[in-house]
Structure formats: C-alpha cells, structure tokens
Image (tube, rainbow, N blue to C red):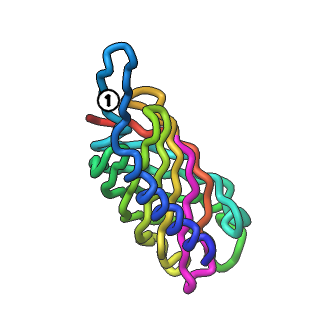
Amino acid sequence: MKKIYLATVFTVLMVFGAFSQTVVRTTTTSNQQTMYRALPNGHDGLNVGASFMLPIDVLSDYSSAGLALDINYLYPIAPSINMGFATGYSVVYNDYDGIFSESWFAEDVQFIPVSIATRYIPTSKVEFGADLGYAISLTDDLFDGGFYYRPVIGFNVTDLIQLNFSYTGVSNNRSWVTWSTLNFGVMFNLN
C-alpha cells in the first residue's frame, strides 16, 4: 500500500510542479530585448523499446531474470510535460522448471500492461515519469494481474535513443506473487 501511495503522490507532484515552468525568458542587458526559447519536449510520439528485468522482493525467490517489450505514445500537453498511453509485454522466467511435482510455479509469469504514461522533461537530456494502469495476466492460476505502477528515469542519448531505469510493481491482494522488478532498458523514438 505504501508503494501505491508513493507512486500516486510522485505523479501528482510531478504534474503540478511542471506547470510553474512554462517558458524560459532571457533578458540581455545590452539591447534590453527579451528572448524566449522553447523548453525541451523529450521523446514525444511513438516510442518502442526493451528492458532487462531484475526481480526483487518475493519474485526474486523464484526467478532471476526477465524481459519487457515497451511501447508508448506520448503527446505534449504542456511545456515540459508529455502524456499518453503505454503498453507492452513483460515476462519473468521461472528458475524451477520440472523440480516440483505440482506445477504451482512451472510456468513463466507474464502480463500485458495497459497504462497512462506521464513524462516531465526538465532538460533535453533527462526525463522523469510514471506509468499507472492495470496489468493483464497471461499466466493461469499463478498471477491474477492487478494495479500496475512504473516510475521511470530516462536519459536521452540522442533525439532517437533513450536509456531508462525504472521500477515495475504490480499489486494484487488475491495473488501470492507481488511483482517487483528493477528494469534497465533502451527506448527508440520512431518519429
């Protein structure tokens, strides 16, 4: 519950704090002209990427690695703020195939996230954001899906390539698995 609260507070503060930084104004003393420059808009538009997932917490007892494919479409809604939708496919590979007589953890844990994505771009090289939504489970009887949250920090290498670090959490009280992973990935802007 603390993680959900923290992710919600982070997103709300990020959105409200960004509205105070709409335009950068520079005044030169020699000719007393005011010049305006546009703030960075980050990786808006269609973005596709992949991440290596490192399971932590309870999930790390059953798996040591995972992969995620990410797709998002972001639209600038205000200076320095992009918002849109995000989806993809995530899987954490089972380390215990064939060991147990019952198949209570015999398959990989998989889900498809469907979420709203928000990004705050303070500079042209750094982005902060969060994805909030629902994770649809693809794993029978093991993982029911649930509330999906993913805080993200992105470093824009070029206009087309971004390295990102994130935490993915899926909360569901009916499932014994709490999805918790640290993610290291790359995103490509297709605009």
Residue 67 lies, with reference to residue 111, above or below; the image says above
Q: Indicate yes or no whether the magenta region holds residue 168.
A: yes
Query: Going by the image, does 181 lie left or right of 160?
Result: right
User: Taking the image as drawn, is residue 189 in sight?
Assistant: yes
Task: Measuring from the top left, give residue 144's x and y in whole percent.
Answer: 49, 78
- 55 left or right, relative to 154: right
Q: Which residue corresponds to mark 1?
A: 37
Residue 95 appears in the rendering: no
Q: Position of residue 159 (x, y in %)?
A: 37, 29
Residue at x 56% of width, y 73% of height: 5
- Which residue does the image show at 47% across and 56% down from the upper left? 14
For this view, does 185 lie left or right of residue 20?
right
Which residue is nearer to you in this view: 143 or 46? 46
Q: Secondary structure at mark 1?
A: strand
Is the residue 36 above or below the residue 79 in the image?
above
Q: Quadrant of residue 21?
A: top left
- Quadrant location, the N terminus: bottom right
Q: Please rate how many residues cluster around mark 1, counting C-alpha atoms within 10 Å: few if below 14, some from 14 to 19, many from 20.
A: few
* Closer-to-camera residue (149/33): 33
Of the 4 image quadrants, the one containing the C terminus is: top left
Question: Taking 154 as reference, is 99 left or right?
Answer: right
Q: Amino acid at mark 1?
A: Arg
Question: What segment carries the magenta color?
Answer: 164-178
